[in-house]
Amino acid sequence: MAIDNNVVFINGNATKDVELRKTSSGDDIASMTVAVNGYNDRVSYIDTILWGKNAEIASKYVTKGK
């Protein structure tokens, strides 16, 4: 059995609006940082990169604080 994709679920809030851009080959790529509340009110900041359709969807629906 082959696994084609890695999947990670991050539950938190975007620290700013998603930044969408295109690669030289025309693929969508989006970057954003997610703030995740943890144990004892500590916050972790996770930099994320999304590709293709996921990048396009995130740029439409994810805004700062969501």
Image: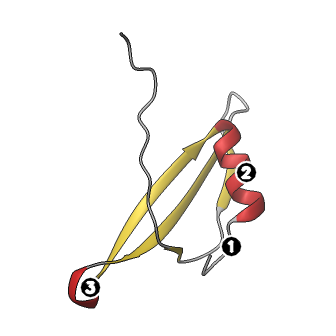
Residue 63: mark in rendering: 1
Q: Position of residue 19 (x, y in %)?
A: 65, 61
Taking the image as shown, residue 33 lies to the left or right of residue 1, namely right
Taking the image as shown, residue 9 lies to the left or right of residue 62, namely left
Please say if the residues under marks 1 and 3 sit with CB atoms less than 8 Å apart: no
Please say if the residues under marks 2 and 1 sit with CB atoms less than 8 Å apart: no
Q: CA distance from mark 3 to mark 2?
A: 29 Å
- The residue that appears at 39% across and 20% down in the rendered structure is 3
Q: Is residue 7 above or below residue 65?
A: above
- The residue that appears at 28% across and 89% down in the rendered structure is 41
Residue 57: mark in rendering: 2
Q: Using a 10 Å C-alpha cutoff, classify the residue at mark 1 as few (fewer than 14 neighbours), some (14 to 19) or many (20 or more).
A: some
Earlier along the polypeptide chain: callout 2 or callout 1?
Answer: 2
- The residue that appears at 47% across and 56% down in the rendered structure is 48
The quadrant of the image that shows the N terminus is: top left
Q: CA distance from mark 2 to mark 1?
A: 11 Å
Image quadrant of residue 16? bottom right
Image quadrant of residue 62? bottom right
Q: Position of residue 35 (x, y in %)?
A: 43, 75
Q: Which residue is mark 3?
A: 42
Q: Position of residue 47 (x, y in %)?
A: 42, 61
Earlier along the polypeptide chain: callout 3 or callout 2?
Answer: 3
